[in-house]
Amino acid sequence: RTRVTQEHFEEAKNKLSSLKEDPGNDVKLKIYALFKQATHGPCDTPKPGMLDFINKAKWDSWKSLGSMTQEEARQRYCDLIGSLVAAEGGAAAQAPARSSAGGRTYDSLLVSTQDDITTIVLNRPAKKNAITTQMYEEIIEALQHAARDHSVVTVFTGAGDFYCSGNDLSNFTKIPEGGAEQMAKAGGELLRRYVKAFIDFPKPLVAVVNGPAVGISVTVMGMFDLVYATESVCATFHTPFSQLGQSPEGCSSYTFPRIMGLGKANEMLLFNKKLTAFQACQLGLVTEVFPDSSFHAEVWSRLKNYAKLPPNSLALSKQLIRSVEKERLHAVNDAEVDRLIERWMSDECFNAVMSFFQAKAKL
Amino acid sequence: RTRVTQEHFEEAKNKLSSLKEDPGNDVKLKIYALFKQATHGPCDTPKPGMLDFINKAKWDSWKSLGSMTQEEARQRYCDLIGSLVAAEGGAAAQAPARSSAGGRTYDSLLVSTQDDITTIVLNRPAKKNAITTQMYEEIIEALQHAARDHSVVTVFTGAGDFYCSGNDLSNFTKIPEGGAEQMAKAGGELLRRYVKAFIDFPKPLVAVVNGPAVGISVTVMGMFDLVYATESVCATFHTPFSQLGQSPEGCSSYTFPRIMGLGKANEMLLFNKKLTAFQACQLGLVTEVFPDSSFHAEVWSRLKNYAKLPPNSLALSKQLIRSVEKERLHAVNDAEVDRLIERWMSDECFNAVMSFFQAKAKL
Amino acid sequence: RTRVTQEHFEEAKNKLSSLKEDPGNDVKLKIYALFKQATHGPCDTPKPGMLDFINKAKWDSWKSLGSMTQEEARQRYCDLIGSLVAAEGGAAAQAPARSSAGGRTYDSLLVSTQDDITTIVLNRPAKKNAITTQMYEEIIEALQHAARDHSVVTVFTGAGDFYCSGNDLSNFTKIPEGGAEQMAKAGGELLRRYVKAFIDFPKPLVAVVNGPAVGISVTVMGMFDLVYATESVCATFHTPFSQLGQSPEGCSSYTFPRIMGLGKANEMLLFNKKLTAFQACQLGLVTEVFPDSSFHAEVWSRLKNYAKLPPNSLALSKQLIRSVEKERLHAVNDAEVDRLIERWMSDECFNAVMSFFQAKAKL
């Protein structure tokens, strides 16, 4: 093992910020601890209070390094980050994360067109297809492209075991210079454009729900023209807004009560009830549930037949159905986003999200 | 037994009008008969026609007193009214009908706040919790209070075996000086304010349906955020409007078709179909049905958990969902009330309500 | 057999255009062939390409007559048309197609009023009650009459095994002088007035679905106050719009998503899914399904009871429920008709309808 120079250390620090995937809380605490140990030496600050969860977790991690030398910490820091970078490269080698559709490549999506069907695959399986800020932008772009391409039907699905775990809450942890208010406003504008892309989408849009769906991946389903789900016990539908101090988006405050009635919608949107695919189908959120074993074969065979129907008739019929409530959906989107911006700046929301991170980190 | 003076008789007459509870048709016919016998003597008017139900019933009752002396009739009149007054006092002694919430006491409601839940209990069990004019006013006031108190969730339920038997039809029998038109208009204004209180209620509102629900207690359910019902065969849902020559209220002409589809809504609102809790749940009017044995335990355990969620998130999410159709609901309420005022002044409605009373009195 | 004069031949040609019922594609191809053979002689034109279905079918039919003489062809032509005319007359003799209601007689409907119920029977059983241009006009008139008569409830049902097979596609084959554009516009205006008659109908309107229902007979069901269907396997609900290159009408682009949720509505309106009565009932399009054996007895017994309810209360309650979305329904009707007029003039639609005729003719 060669001695780690300050230069190597700086290089590792830079590589850290270029990682595409969030390595998770455990790894991040380890990185924090090694960095402190390398730059400051053994932990010598007072132990934070029991209720100061995050600082307590950081302190515990740093403290656990004991009297490790700064050089040893630098070495381990560089090794750890090197392994993370290599892992990302390796994954990319096995299954190229970039896909081409009309010349456009995406970091977080696989987009392809076949049999007159454009398929958009959420492709962050290691992160349960959680949607980062960049991924929101990519999905908007992919939808805009699919709207103009020659395909007849557009399909959304997820890579791996998850359909989509919703908004990547790490989006909330990268506080920009303008502070929480600027973050909330920027997040709101992005959300508004994201939901708008679904409201305005001009062709039949189908969700192929291959696993658990959470948050915004569930709420926008009310605007999908078909939602096909596997009956696997894993394919659940969950919108835990109030638990996170937030409020409904994706036009769900309008579509869900219309789809399933006010009471059932409130159980989901206000009281965090998680539905199975079968329950979601009974309530009309899911159009049809298929046995896990035949899910893909059945669904794709059906979609291929649909894509053979007269394309203009399909698109114009879909637009006709949408036109009745398009203006209303835009107004609902605006109202939901405005309310969420307020929520994101509230103490109630901040505390609820923090509790979530702490529960996740099992501290 | 002392001799009844004219003074005693006048006193009894005055007490009669101060009775809080309607003594029912049988008793009222007896009171009528004794009054006629006491003031006029034995029945000597011609027998009304078979189809003149009410006058026939009154005549039958008077005639049944035969040759009873006027003094005896006065005595029995005073005794009967005395027993009714005593019964009301006695009932009040056994279970105090007045309850305190924020310093306010109600005659017909029990209102209390515990575990961040404000509970409004309709408390006229002897009258199946039928809603009198005064009770409408008290419920409006209780809702306005609950909107401002520190509770997170507000619950509606009924004392005794009934949830609520709807509008107390005796409201129709107290014709004021201004006649039927004034009664109809005043009733309409009260109804408008009553329904408005539900449209504007800013927190999650839950119906805990413990028994049969009739009329306006059913129609406003479309605006409750959750409706939990016992699966007891007794918990039925009934809106017999056309049978009474009336028309839907409580915004049900808007909410019911949206909840259960036009056909099923019409079966209830036009054609008087009575639903079981299970059927109401399948149609989305009821959110969930619980076994009678575990109904209270299950529901209250769940509600207590709901009341622990971030309060602002819950209230703002509920308001967001409501905001989409608030204006529409107010317009619907106005239209329904206007139509009902017309209905109440129509012969068709008058005759249908009279038939109802006659059927009830088994004449 | 007497020799057929040119006069007889001209007479037969004229009788052909006065036939009330479309004799079907097979017969029409035979008529075409005999006419060509009679006026031109044996088929001597080049065989059309495999994909030129209609001309190929005509050519095949003509060719099949071989070297038949022109005189023989004239004779057979006159015989065939004579038998068609006689068959229509005979059918009329067995069961008079004209029925009287308020002095008005209809060619394609049986309209009668009994027990305060006006019943409109679609009466083209040999054509599966497909709706011709004239029949649309008659139904509009029958509805306008029922709106003003003294009946309490109005019922729609079909004669024979079908409820209604929808728009008679032969409406598309009678191209007027103004060409396809004029036909599309005239058809659109007729459709607009037809659907308007259902939107504005002021009394409870009930569909008694006795067999398969297709196209516009299904789409307008979203505006019926009750839909009762036999559970017979034959009573299916089918709206194959995109298959015919068309788009939804009858306000179904608005009512269907509200009745059954967007996904299930799209399966019908975009993807041509055919529902059984039981499925349609689960989705709320059908109000109740009855065993085939007791269908008529049960339904009519129930309707007779409904018709005894206070008529004004029923009509005003229905109007109240409708009023909430009447303006919206008219706007939807306009948008649907405008889109359909465009569709009818499109090549996509033309080709899809032609394919349908060819598939039907099993060519």
Image (cartoon, coloured by chain):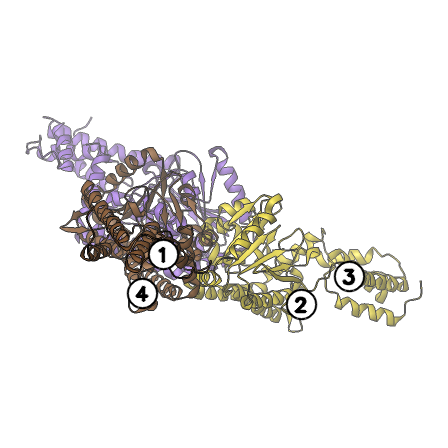
Chain colours: A brown, B yellow, C purple
Specify few, some or many for label 2: CA neighbours under 10 Å numbering under 14, 14-19, or 20 or more: some
**Residue type at tag 1:** Lys
Camera-nearest residue between A332 and A12:
A12
Residue type indicated by callout 2:
Thr
Q: Chain of mark 2?
A: B
Q: Nearer the viewer, mark 1 or mark 4?
A: 4
Q: Are the residues flagged by discs 3 and 1 from a single subunit?
A: no
- Vertical placement of residue C213 versus C140, above or below: above
Q: Secondary structure at mark 3?
A: helix
**Amino acid type, label 3:** Ala
Camera-side residue of C71 and B91: B91
- Say what secondary structure mark 2 lies in: strand
Closer to the camera in the image, B296 or C245:
B296
Residue assigned mark 1: C196
Number of residues whose C-alpha sits closer than 10 Å to that of mark 4, classed few (under 14), some (14–19) or many (20 or more): many
Question: Which residue is labeled 2 in the image?
Answer: B105
Residue at the (32%, 48%) spot, across then down: A164
Reading the image, the residue beneath label 3 is: B93
Q: Residue furthest bottom?
A: B178
Residue extending farthest to the right is B2
Give the residue number, with chain letter if any, for mark 4: A183
3 and 2 marks in contact (CB < 8 Å)? no
Query: How many callouts does the rendering have?
Result: 4
Which residue type does callout 4 highlight? Met
